[in-house]
Image (cartoon, grey):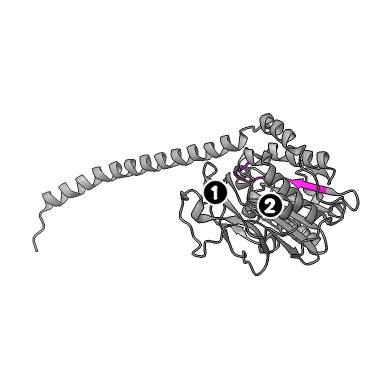
Amino acid sequence: MTICIPRLFQCLLLLGLALPILAAQETEAQGDANQVKDQQRQQVIDKFNQVHEVDQQVVSEFKSVVRDIKPSVSPAKPRKLLVYAVSHGPHRFVIPTGKVVLEMLGQETGAYSAVVSDDLAHFEPDALKQFDSVCFANTTGEVFYRPIARHLFDELSAEQQAAQVANAQRLVKNLTEYVRNGGGFLGIHAATDTLKKSPAYGEMIGGYFDGHPWSGSQTVSIRIEQPDHALCKDIFKGEGFSIAEEIYQMKEPYSRDELHVLLSVDVDHSDKPTKPLKREDKDYPISWFKEYGKGRVFYSSLGHNKSTFHNPLVIQHWLEGLQYVLGDKPGED
């Protein structure tokens, strides 16, 4: 076998020149990837740091609407509601307005007084006892983690994150046991996109968010499934309604065998969804109630758009649900 020494030397020389070039190109590509990653992270930070104020126009509209909204039953005693509205991600734009509306709804109707707080101390067992019900208003993600900002949580050490996870699991247990032992729970919109790492919470609320085929700019037709039910009959008069809203589809543990669906989407008379529908049964619930042990749960998937917070039909339906979870209104069919 004959080896051409000059050609071999030439190949080695070229390879020696090529390797630094390839290394430089790889370094440049990695730098570009890091730059994109840094830009994405900064976008997340900027979005979280954006300050969202109370929408005074919505509040003004609500004040006009609430004059005609009355509790269907008188409270058996003064009722106290904890409103918790922490987002580990989206929906922060509507939360300040939602807090104000829920507090004012209690004041204006006399159905309850609200404690609006993000303090985790309220989820200790003795503290929970003071409330007739808890309301998760557009909570999103792992809402018992601290810091609340996801990018700050991600910067914690592994040990610190593990401690936060353990504490969150303890608080979920406190909440679910509180409801199981006779407390109330009301969830608004993203409350089903909350605490997905805690199956006990999903079992309690009745289902988990699995995407939103309809965006907030689309209009859907709402079907009244139980027009004669106490939580519906004095509001809708047996007739459905249309609303522009972001509509969720649900996944396990959602099951009609475990809860009572009150409102649902009439798919055939709604705008065409912008994302694929995942349910072959076309079952897209809007609100439901259920018993959880000795406790009471009511959920409404409406509440993404600010305009929903001055929609008289929705507000009256929420009030009926609130009176159910607070213990003043029966939920039997």
The quadrant in which residue 225 appears is bottom right
The quadrant in which residue 283 appears is bottom right
Residue 35 falls left or right of residue 291: left
**Near-viewer residue (224 or 152):** 224
Part of the protein shown in magenta: 81-93
If you read the primary sequence from the N terminus, does the residue marked by circle 1 or circle 2 appear first? Answer: 1
Image quadrant holding the C terminus, namely: bottom right
**Near-viewer residue (294 or 5):** 294
Q: Which mark is residue 303?
A: none
Label 1 Cα crowd, 10 Å radius (few <14 / some 14-19 / many 20+): many
> Residue furthest toward the left?
2
Q: Residue 232: where, in percent of width, then height?
A: 71, 54
Q: Amino acid under label 2?
A: Lys
Mark 1, secondary structure of its residue? strand
Q: Which mark is residue 237?
A: 2
Q: Residue 51: where, in percent of width, then height?
A: 64, 32
Image quadrant holding the N terminus, namely: bottom left
Task: Quote the CA–CA distance across marks 1 and 2.
Answer: 19 Å
As displayed, is residue 284 above or below residue 235?
below
Q: Amino acid under label 1?
A: Val
What residue appears at the point 69 percent right and 42 percent down from the top-left corner?
Answer: 312
Q: Residue 309: where, in percent of width, then height?
A: 67, 40
Q: Looking at the image, how many numbered discs can be counted on the residues?
A: 2
Write down the residue under mark 1: 220
Mark 2, secondary structure of its residue? loop
Q: Residue 2: where, in percent of width, then height?
A: 8, 60
As displayed, is residue 202 above or below residue 20?
below
